[in-house]
Every structure is written in structure tokens, then in C-alpha cells.
Amino acid sequence: PARPFLLLISGLGGGSQDTYVRSMAAAAAERGWQVGVLNMRGCGGSPVTSPRFFSAFRGATDDVRLAIRHVRSTRLLQTPEQLGAEPDAQLATRQRAGEPAGDKETAGRRRATPVAVLGWSNGGSIVNNFLAEQATTYSEAQGACPLGVGDAAASLACPLNMVANSENLRRPFHAAVYDRSIARSLATKFASARGLYEAPFAPSTIDKAFSRTTPGSASSASPSPVPVPVPRWEGLGPGAGTFVADVELAASSPTIRGIDAAVTAPCFGFASVDEYYAFASSDQRLCLVNRPLLVLSAYDDPIAIGGAIPLGCARENPKHVVLAVTAHGGHLGWCERDDPWGSPAWVERASLGFLESALDLPRGVVSPLDSRNSFRTIRGGFVYF
């Protein structure tokens, strides 16, 4: 059979260039996976060609489904003989005889190869919300394309309760270090695409006359860009309307919250940033997931704080969700005790071992799965270390 495929989604503002993403990709490839990285809009050096970035839910989960459909359609199609299905010649004969065109047969061949998704931090929120949608509004029973399905997933250092985690970032040290650093990266990305949210402003006749008679005001007559209405996310429906981004705030805010208030919340149909955080928090949807999902968090995480980890979610959905909490690890840390500056080998073994076990991958498709023993005890959906 074709090798399984792993789709990686980085943390907020990150991308395929990040060290932890490249390390996980290398570890998975060594174990026999095909690997791809989905860079969110504007991240990983990808250009932004329309006035829309990404969120922790709306829009981003659409991009995950699109990426999986593309992977299945271009890389994972197997021959009928590999799957024990009827040969193409027989299928073509049936179609010429007026029988169904065979879309389901083709989709079945592409679906036969497992696709797993792994996300860090905000990417973890996207993964969790994607799986919840896949089980509900975007299920095959609701007519969703079967090629956009993920078969298993892992969510690492995910801010499950975005409201609580946003409040945590207001603490003085966290605001000065973590919030400011991430916000600077996001603001830079927005600034490079702010022209999509603005249009040149031509000064009026009065402005021109004033500039000719006012010393030092000649530059006031020069065309300057002004924010203009741009479309909201199309998933809101025909009445989605438009919004005007706070361009100056989005391009210079020292906080993630400021950027989300300036552009993310209004783009995706939220009246406020608090409404966006409450809606996009993925803890409330873990009970809906119907595919294997590992949620791995560190209790000492300074960003996705341990106090906001919903310990009851594993009890609500123990068949599909495994919640693993380590005492230490920080945010995307989990470094090796013997090699703290090297690759985070433990979390790579644990994550990939979970996915391989969950998908019941046969030997020969992936390397020997000694990491299946990375978890000490699993009881009622919890992992104890």
C-alpha cells in the first residue's frame, strides 16, 4: 500500500521554516511517512493574494480540507489491484454500458491511504476544530467531499480555552515577552499585505488649494492610502457583507489581541475579539470528535496554561480523545533531558507512535513502532506520566 501521509500545521504565525516543524517532518519521514506542511495564509513565506488571513477556526479548517483533498487527489491514488478492487478496464466497461461513473470507486482508492494531521499551538486549535467539523457539519452524511477527511490527528500545546489564555497573556512578563514577540511577527505579516485592505486616496480640490497656501503642507495633496471595505469570509453566506480593517492597529499592535480585534474578528463575522475567542476555543468541541485524537499539553506551558486544560473532555469522549498532560515541557518545548538543545525526540516519538497505533499501520509501511510504549498508562482517556 501507499505510505501514509502526515500534514503538519505550525503554531501562530509560524510555518515550514520553523525548527520544530522541520524536525517533526524529518522524524516522520524516517519512519516511513510522506510529509507535507500547510502554511497558513501569509505564513512560511507564502503570499497573501486576497484580503483574508487565517483564524483558529473559520476559514482555516476550510484550508485544511482543501489541502487534504489536494494530497489525496495528486499523491495518494492507488491502483485497483493494490486495493483488491476491480481493474480500471472493467470499470471503464461498466461505465460505457451506462452504469454509474464510478466517482465513489475513485474516492475509495484515494481514501484507502491514511492521512493524519498534526498541529502545534494555534495549529492545534485548527486541528481540533477541523475534526469536530468533520464529525458534524462537514461529515460525509452531510454531503461533504470524502477526499477531505483526516483519519487521525495530534494537537500539541494547544490553547484549548482561548479566553483564559488571552487573559494570561496580559500578565506583565507574558505581555512583554511572549505576547509582544508573537504580535510583532503577525503585524509584520499584515503590514506586507496591507495594500489589500486599502485604496489610494485622491485629495479633493479644497485639499489641493489648502496645500498650495499652507507652508509645509505640500505633501498633504499627495495621494495616500485609506482603509476600504473588503469582503468578509465567504463561509458566512450571501449576506456576509464587508468590513473595514483597522489597518494601523493591525500593522503595529504590540498584542495578539489587538491584531485579532483589528482584522481577524471582523473578517470572520465576530462582533468582538472576545466573541471570536469564545467561539474558536476548541475545548467545547472535543466531545464531538469521532476520529483518534491525541491532545498533548504541558502543565507548565506559559502560553497554553495548565489551569485551562479541560480535564473532563477525555471522560466525555474516551473512545476517540486521549488527553496527555506532562508536568514540564513549556510551550512547544519537551526537550530531551540528555540533549536539551537537540531535537524534541520524545514528543516526536509519542505523537507519531500514537498516530501509527491509532491507524493500526502494518509493519513495513512504517518503521518498527517502539514508541507505542511511550505512554505509561492510559485510563479513561487520560495518559499518566
Image (spheres, rainbow, N blue to C red):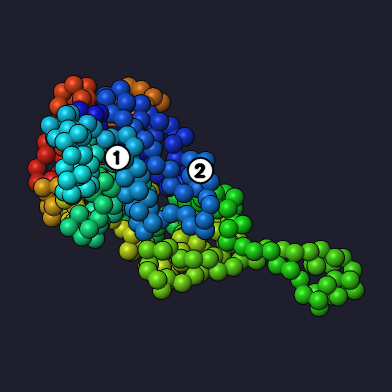
The residue at the point 74 percent across, 68 percent down is 202
Amino acid type for the residue under numbered disc 1: Arg
User: 10 Å neighbourhood of mark 1: few (<14), some, or many (≥20)?
Assistant: many
Task: Name the quarter where the N terminus is drawn.
Answer: top left
Q: Nearer the viewer, residue 330 or 270?
A: 270
Which residue type carries mark 2? Ser
Q: Find residue 133 and report its horizontal and vertical position in percent.
A: 25, 56
x and y, in percent, of residue 352 in the image = 24, 32
Query: Which label belongs to residue 11?
Result: none
**For residue 68, above or below residue 27:** below
Q: Is residue 271 above or below residue 136?
A: below
Q: Please tell me whether residue 154 is drawn above or below residue 138 in the rendered image.
A: above
Task: Report the side of 138 relative to 212 (left or right).
Answer: left
Position of residue 183 in the picture relative to residue 367 (left or right): right
Disc 2 designates what residue? 46
The residue drawn where x is 48% and y is 40% is 44
Relative side of 200 to 357, left or right: right
Q: Secondary structure at mark 2?
A: loop
Is 162 or 88 nearer to us in this picture?
88
Residue position for label 1: 72
Which quarter of the rendered picture does the C terminus lie within?
Answer: top left
Q: Residue at x 57, y 49 (%)?
A: 188
Q: Residues within 10 Å of mark 2 (few under 14, many from 20)?
A: few
Q: Residue furthest front?
A: 97
Is residue 21 rendered to the left or right of residue 366? right
User: Element at badge 1?
Assistant: helix
Give x and y (percent) for residue 64: 34, 48
- The picture quadrant where one finds residue 9 is top left
